[in-house]
Amino acid sequence: MHPQLIVLFLATLFSVFGSSAAASAADWRSRSIYQIVTDRFSRSDGSYTSPCDTNARQYCGGTWRGIINKLDYIQNMGFTAIWISPIIKQLPNNTYEGEPYHGYWPENLYALNSNFGTEQDLIDLITACHSRGMYLMLDIVINHFASMGETPNYEAFVPFSHERFFHPPCPIDWGNQTSIENCWMGDGFVSLPDINTEDPVVVDTWKKYLVSLVDKYKIDGLRLDACRNIPKSVSGEISRAANVYSQGEVWDRDPNIICPYQEYMDGMHNYPFKELATDAFVSSTGNLTDFVTVVHQMQAQCKDVTLFGTFMENHDNPRLGSFTTDIARLKSLAVLNILTDGIPVVYYGQELALTGSNDPMNREALWLTGYSTNNTLVPTFTALNAFRNFLVMSGVQFITTLATYTVVSSSVIRVQKGNVVIVLTNSGKDVVTNTVVDGFGEGMELVEVLTCGVLQADDAGRVQISLTGDPMVLYPKSLMTRSRIC
């Protein structure tokens, strides 16, 4: 879709949803989110050469003003929301573990992280997003504060400036939920004192803070860090008070662990989907049956997977490019990311097929890439977002319809969501895989959305396909006439 058409679409969408400060879970379903590590996305000075040693774990100079300057880059790919790093003041020290450029070592709720800019810069960023019809999701750390060494300076924590607001120190036993909720993360070099979120004073303070924050800055949604370390009821109480869509992080691939959290929050990161999809598609030996099985589990056991965040990369996990550089496999994962159940979340740099492995190497400075839009996944994400945005605007029941997954063979799956039919293989680029896709009308013409090619079903409603590694996204040609996509 042409950039001007994307801007027009967003303006229309925003006018339908009304005030951004009251963005609901239903509103967020239509969105496609671009996740940003603020320090690593774009600098205020627009430099493409300013150095950034990811291994040093130090501030590299990305800012809110830098994001404003690159909103065209994001919006031209069809993304309709951004998620930015935590904004509050951090532990000021350069520690053995580096600096808190990531935003997850908070010290003062009521002060901003000056490394990212001024308060006016933050306001201008949110205003710029809203003027484009885009939403802004803010990352929030509720579970802990941060301090140098094993003995915290509690007086430095604002507003929880006393030891009584924290659980006693203890190492986490990740096999025990009580221990997960009460004990401390951290490694001794940087302690992460665990806030006593069972204390009514603490909960009330958090609620008032988030209500004020959302109202003051007109925040559209919240991402709650480390939800597994907080009692479910507390996460629910705090997120309900904020009165905007909230998406929580519970890092586990087991639906039995993930799904119960949605009884208290709008949505979660769909870690089971991400983990099993990665396992299935980064290699021709991946198990497609295991992937489809976990998708069915999530659909059956969770309250509403269409409110989950569907992602393939983030700041905590190795980039897909560290597992495979096969562009066909990366395209298949992009299709799953954007067009299946849930709210798509794409990590900055995923569109450029970056290859960083574990933290901190997966937090590269994007300006060093030059924001290239050629010979990357940028055209793929642009086409996928344009198509999803078209489906949202066309009024079809796409975003609330659960996808149906079918294992066709050991290397091919079919996914159907409404009238959209997706055919994926893990065979890899240029490996020919012949398959048959049925269930269409007699002689129906179908557009392949990523290439704009046209296929036709036979008299029995079947289409003979020779895959060469790339995914196929099929949609009835008769329904595409007003899309301006193909």
Image (tube, rainbow, N blue to C red):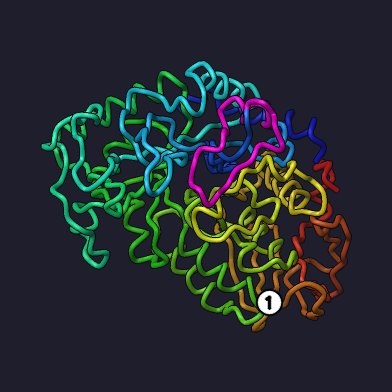
Q: What percent of the width, then of the height, locates residue 118? A: 49, 19
- Residue 437, compared with residue 235, is above or below; it is below
User: Amino acid type of disc 1?
Assistant: Val
Residue furthest to the left in view is 164
On the image, the x and y values in percent for residue 175 come to: 25, 67
Residue 395, percent from left and from top: 66, 41
- The kind of secondary structure element at disc 1 is strand
Residue found at the far top of this picture = 120
Tell whether 141 sits left or right of 199: right
Indicate whether 351 appears above or below 195: below
Q: Residue at x 53, y 72 (%)?
A: 291
Q: Quadrant of residue 7?
A: top right
* Residue nearest the observer in this picture, 475 or 136: 136
* Left-right relation of 43 to 326: left
The residue under label 1 is 412
Please give the range of residues in magenta. 44-70
Please check the rendered image and state whether residue 51 is part of the magenta-colored stretch, yes or no: yes
State the residue at coordinates (29%, 40%): 146
Where is residue 214 shown, x and y percent of the image? 40, 25
Is residue 357 inside the magenta stretch? no
Q: Is residue 192 above or below residue 212?
A: below
Q: Quadrant of residue 430?
A: bottom right
Q: What's the residue at 15%, 37% (across, down)? A: 165
